[in-house]
Amino acid sequence: EAGVTQFPSHSVIEKGQTVTLRCDPISGHDNLYWYRRVMGKEIKFLLHFVKESKQDESGMPNNRFLAERTGGTYSTLKVQPAELEDSGVYFCASSLAGTPPTNEKLFFGSGTQLSVL
Amino acid sequence: AQSVTQPDIHITVSEGASLELRCNYSYGATPYLFWYVQSPGQGLQLLLKYFSGDTLVQGIKGFEAEFKRSQSSFNLRKPSVHWSDAAEYFCAVGPFSGGYNKLIFGAGTRLAVHP
């Protein structure tokens, strides 16, 4: 079974450019999460999809970030325009709803390393 | 404020030695606690989790962790480290503000293993 796949693995762009990160969750996983780790610090929650709906986007830093999950399958995270402080590793994770919820298990992708110069 | 502190940024141990990685949390309610590991080029993998019951939790790869409410700690241990354990380890607490897998992570501890 394929795991969570993220593209690209690395991206180097200049300040002001646009970058789109993609996440393919495990097939059949309704829950999809985006997390970010900046400058080797804590990994922080960005947002949560349930199928194609944004369940919670309280962690999105600002309106330069746009996440979509059309059709409830893969998700994209666009940063436009990118700023220096957006550099970091962007992780995607997916899960099946658990019964009870404590059975829910997150599967993480290996992340996209974004460098904004 | 809810937070997770991993006091050690880097730890180096010799293969076969015991290991303890520290984790302290600040959380307003009964926490759910997790340890994840990230090996080079891989995604984060769940090592173990604590929800309730026995405060000593067994995980994969021979790891265990002990929840100590009085100390707000959830330290990870392994009696004998293998070279393949070299990785970065993250402690996490959740859920916060709803959402079961909305986790608060620590900054991670990078483990190096000497032969």
Image (spheres, grey):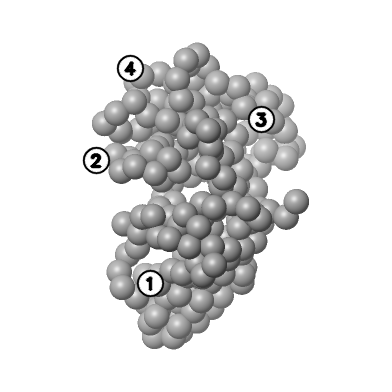
The residue type indicated by label 2 comes to Ala
| Quadrant, the N terminus of chain B | top left
Q: CA distance from mark 2 to mark 4?
A: 18 Å
Cβ atoms under marks 4 and 1 closer than 8 Å: no
Label 3 crowd (10 A; few <14 / some 14-19 / many >=20) = few
Q: Is residue A111 above or below residue B93?
A: below
The disc labelled 3 sits on which kind of residue? Ile
Kindly identify which residue carries mark 3.
B60
Q: Which mark is residue B70?
A: 4
**What residue lies at 34% left-to-right and 75% top-to-bottom?**
A64
Name which residue type carries label 1.
Phe
Q: Where does residue B28 sit, x and y in percent of width and height?
A: 26, 31
The picture places residue B4, in percent across and down from the top left corner, at 37, 38
State which quarter of the image contains the C terminus of chain B. top right
Q: Report the residue marked by disc 2.
A: B1
Q: Position of residue A54 (x, y in %)?
A: 40, 60
